[in-house]
């Protein structure tokens, strides 16, 4: 496709992680290991939890995020490595590491992260939170008042609900829920008294019992406090009263533990006659998949640890002693406490989009001009509003939409169901294989089918990850297609937490391509050559490589050449090699890669002209924005795809050109802001490590800039409306 386009002044104290210095010697392998690169990202998130300039509960939130991130990494990435190890332990990845070497390196890095997590928690966060009247109670040191409340809590709310499970040699170990906190209780063997209390009838010689905490009883149990908020963790409450579960037995030891199961269980689609049934089988298999990690209280005895590790069939590198509470995701609950606003970020209410007139329909607004919105600084509501208006608009004939991840009470799904009830032709591609959202998507798919929505369960062998909605409307001049293209999901909740871009347009050219794309997916037809859009897995990879190679060629011809990209992950070796060639030709390349980056920047003779940065801030950076100088007539794109083999080869993705002048200016300003940031930016070194950029006297914070830009734009619109009179003129018959 060869187209032409129609802060506050304050120095802050922050913690920095000690990192390895970049080597000037060219690397033996030109790629960074993917797994270790991801762990570097999680370390950057962890340093936010250690940042003394952030409000306390925000630091707690970041610590919870690192814990949640590590859980998913263990389930998916480590789980996948273990499966690969079983097949061929000696195969090497592009960085030169065998599977066995990767598992060892990953285990070592993960344990370092865990150690750092609990240093931050115990040496900094918990003491400071306690000073601010948010305190975790130690039942061994608490007041009589707290102890009395704890006693009531246990006997009234816990004892009747939870049940211990004895472990016998002759029966299987209990099937425990992955990531759930459990207690392992070691009991003194007693064979003198029978089950009914009669002498001479020995009891079974079991010495261990398991108490699964489940999800029925809240993990954070409120405790009385003179001021602020006091709580005790459920496992600590039960441990204190553990004897009450075992009358007549002597409890020798009680420790908390948690297992992580392999979630890298994929559907064998060729053997699944019904995709929905197949996905339900995948979900069930995850419940019973093998353990890949055992976390346990650091004070566990050798006997108890040997017992658990044997039952889980885990090696020493899979064992994680935890010096503190297990599963730090409970800190999300603390972050949501009412009445502690001073310990959280000040709210940034989402702004409107100045080009959108709320008194007019979304169709009128889009017909007037293309609209580009940057979330969450600008509200996601116009996207939802567009679909809701379409559901009841008598002139709308059809709605076609891809749904990858949605919220629990999705207004988008509700609008699609309402549209079908109004007799409109509604077609939805619901990706049942969206990891960890499979159950929700299955439920939505069934509900929509009941209401008359034509539901397509994705494509065999691929995940449908594109973010697109097409609304077909009958207007006086004929059929008009209104479209939404995005970089994020149709999820109004995550749209307040993730930084993404939306494009609303009724472009005839994009509409024709979007329709052809959608029909190819739903009709299982041979994909046609698109004129303006690029789609994976058919043309997107080649288009990206062509764009890079074109910049390389221009540079060799003496023209100024530049590539700027903001993506979430850079893994694909073919793309990386193309970027290396561009750098060697002299192309200036700036990459903002949030997470995994397998490219090595700043290597002499290889990547001298490549700079890679990563921003970790208030919102999760999720937008994919691409800029190619193109001889002074820049080409700009937004995309649903990262530069990874899975996105380019195994998913259905879209890359959308942005041609409208106003939208382009806004997108370029957005892109440049991310490379001006020196408040929350990490600079990647050539060995794969990261160094935090030192802020200037007046730090520039990209996310704050984008929010202030949104606020200023709406303030100008409001002032403009107040400065002029716009009388209503009666329409002539």
Image (cartoon, rainbow, N blue to C red):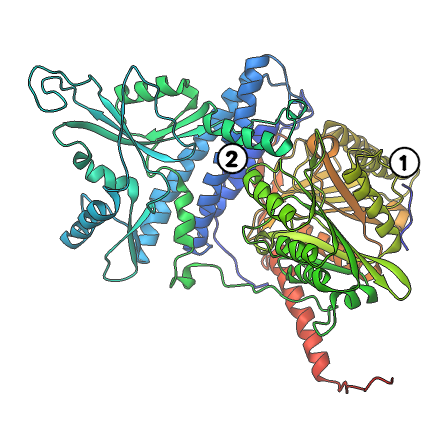
Of discs 2 and 1, which sits in the foreground?
2
In the picture, measured across the screen, residue 332 lies left or right of residue 307, that is right
Give the residue number, with chain letter if any, for mark 1: 553
Quadrant assignment, res 343? bottom left
Secondary structure, mark 1, is helix
Picture coordinates of residue 407 (x, y %)?
Answer: 57, 50
What is the distance, in whole Å, between disc 2 and disc 1 at their CAs? Answer: 42 Å
Q: Along the line of sight, which residue is nearer the eye, 449 or 153? A: 449
Which residue ends up furthest to the right in the rendered image?
557
Picture coordinates of residue 96 (x, y %)?
Answer: 64, 18
Q: Earlier in the sequence, mark 2 or mark 1?
A: 2
Q: Which mark is residue 72?
A: 2
The quarter of the rendered structure image containing the C terminus is: bottom right
Secondary structure, mark 2, is helix
Q: Along the line of sight, which residue is nearer the eye, 254 or 320? A: 254
Q: Residue at x 71, y 63 (%)?
A: 392
Q: Along the line of sight, which residue is nearer the eye, 165 or 695? A: 165
Above or below for 686 versus 378 = above
- Neighbour class for label 2 at 10 Å: few (<14), some, many (≥20)? some
In the picture, measured across the screen, residue 274 lies left or right of residue 637, that is left
The quarter of the rendered structure image containing the N terminus is: top right
Quadrant assignment, res 580? top right
């Amino acid at each position: 496709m060869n187209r032409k386009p129609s802060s506050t002044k304050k120095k802050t104290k922050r913690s920095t992680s000690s990192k390895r210095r970049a080597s000037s010697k060219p690397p033996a392998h030109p790629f960074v290991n993917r797994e270790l690169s991801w762990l570097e990202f999680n370390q950057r998130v962890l340093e936010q939890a250690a940042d003394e300039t952030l409000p306390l509960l925000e630091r707690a939130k970041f610590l919870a995020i690192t814990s949640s991130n590590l859980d998913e990494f263990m389930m998916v990435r480590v789980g996948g490595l273990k499966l690969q190890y079983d097949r061929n332990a000696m195969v090497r990845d592009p960085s030169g590491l065998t599977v066995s070497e990767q598992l060892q390196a990953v285990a070592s890095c993960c344990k370092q992260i865990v150690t750092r997590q609990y240093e931050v928690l115990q040496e900094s966060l918990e003491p400071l939170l306690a000073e601010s009247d948010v305190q975790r109670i130690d039942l061994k040191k608490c007041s009589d008042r707290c102890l009395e409340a704890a006693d009531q809590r246990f006997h009234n709310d816990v004892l009747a609900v939870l049940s211990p499970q004895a472990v016998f040699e002759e029966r299987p170990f209990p099937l425990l829920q992955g990531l759930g906190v459990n207690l392992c209780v070691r009991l003194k063997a007693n064979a003198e008294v029978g089950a009914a209390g009669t002498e001479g009838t020995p009891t079974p010689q079991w010495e261990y019992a398991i108490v699964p905490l489940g999800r029925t009883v809240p993990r954070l149990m409120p405790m009385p406090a003179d001021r602020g908020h006091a709580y005790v963790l459920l496992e600590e409450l039960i441990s204190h009263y553990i004897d009450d579960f075992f009358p007549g037995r002597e409890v020798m030891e009680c420790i908390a533990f948690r297992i992580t199961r392999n979630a890298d269980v994929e559907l064998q689609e060729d053997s699944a006659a019904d995709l929905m049934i197949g996905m339900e089988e995948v979900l069930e298999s995850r419940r019973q998949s093998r353990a890949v990690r055992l976390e346990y209280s650091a004070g566990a005895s050798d006997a108890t640890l040997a017992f658990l590790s044997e039952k889980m069939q885990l090696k020493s590198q899979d064992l994680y002693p935890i010096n503190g509470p297990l599963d730090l995701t409970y800190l999300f609950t603390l972050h949501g406490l009412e009445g502690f606003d001073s310990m959280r970020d000040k709210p940034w209410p989402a702004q409107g989009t100045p080009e959108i007139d709320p008194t007019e329909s979304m169709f009128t607004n889009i017909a007037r001009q293309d609209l580009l919105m940057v979330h969450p600084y600008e509200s996601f509501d116009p996207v939802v509003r567009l679909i809701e208006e379409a559901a009841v608009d008598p002139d709308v004939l059809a709605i076609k939409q891809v749904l990858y991840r949605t919220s629990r009470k999705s207004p988008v799904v509700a609008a699609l169901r309402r549209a079908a009830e109004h007799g409109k032709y509604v077609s939805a591609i619901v990706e049942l294989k969206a990891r960890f959202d499979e159950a929700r998507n299955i439920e939505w798919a069934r509900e929509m089918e009941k209401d008359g929505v034509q539901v397509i369960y994705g494509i065999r062998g691929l995940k449908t990850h594109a973010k697109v909605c097409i609304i077909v409307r009958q207007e006086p001049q004929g059929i008009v297609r209104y479209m939404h293209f995005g970089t994020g999901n149709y999820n109004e909740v995550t749209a307040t937490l993730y930084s993404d871009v939306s494009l609303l347009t009724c472009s005839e050219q994009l509409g024709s391509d979007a329709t052809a794309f959608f029909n190819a997916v739903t009709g299982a037809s041979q994909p046609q050559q698109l004129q303006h859009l690029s789609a994976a897995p058919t043309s997107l990879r080649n288009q990206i490589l062509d764009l890079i190679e074109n910049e390389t060629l221009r540079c060799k011809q003496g023209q100024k050449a530049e590539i700027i990209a903001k993506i979430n992950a850079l893994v694909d070796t073919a793309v990386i090699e193309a970027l290396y060639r561009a750098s060697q030709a002299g192309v200036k390349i700036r990459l903002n890669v949030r997470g995994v980056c397998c490219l090595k920047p700043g290597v002499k003779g290889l990547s001298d002209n490549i700079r890679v940065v990563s921003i970790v801030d208030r919102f999760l950076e999720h937008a994919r924005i691409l800029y190619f100088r193109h001889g002074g007539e820049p080409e700009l794109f937004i995309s649903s795809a990262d530069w990874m083999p899975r996105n380019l080869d195994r998913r259905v993705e879209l890359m959308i050109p942005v041609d409208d002048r106003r939208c382009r200016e806004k997108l370029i300003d957005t892109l440049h802001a991310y490379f001006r940031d020196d408040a929350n930016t990490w600079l990647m070194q050539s060995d794969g490590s990261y160094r935090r950029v030192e802020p200037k006297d007046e730090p520039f914070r990209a996310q704050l800039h984008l929010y202030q830009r949104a606020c200023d734009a709406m303030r100008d619109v409001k002032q403009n409306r107040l400065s002029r009179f716009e009388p209503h003129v009666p329409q002539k018959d």
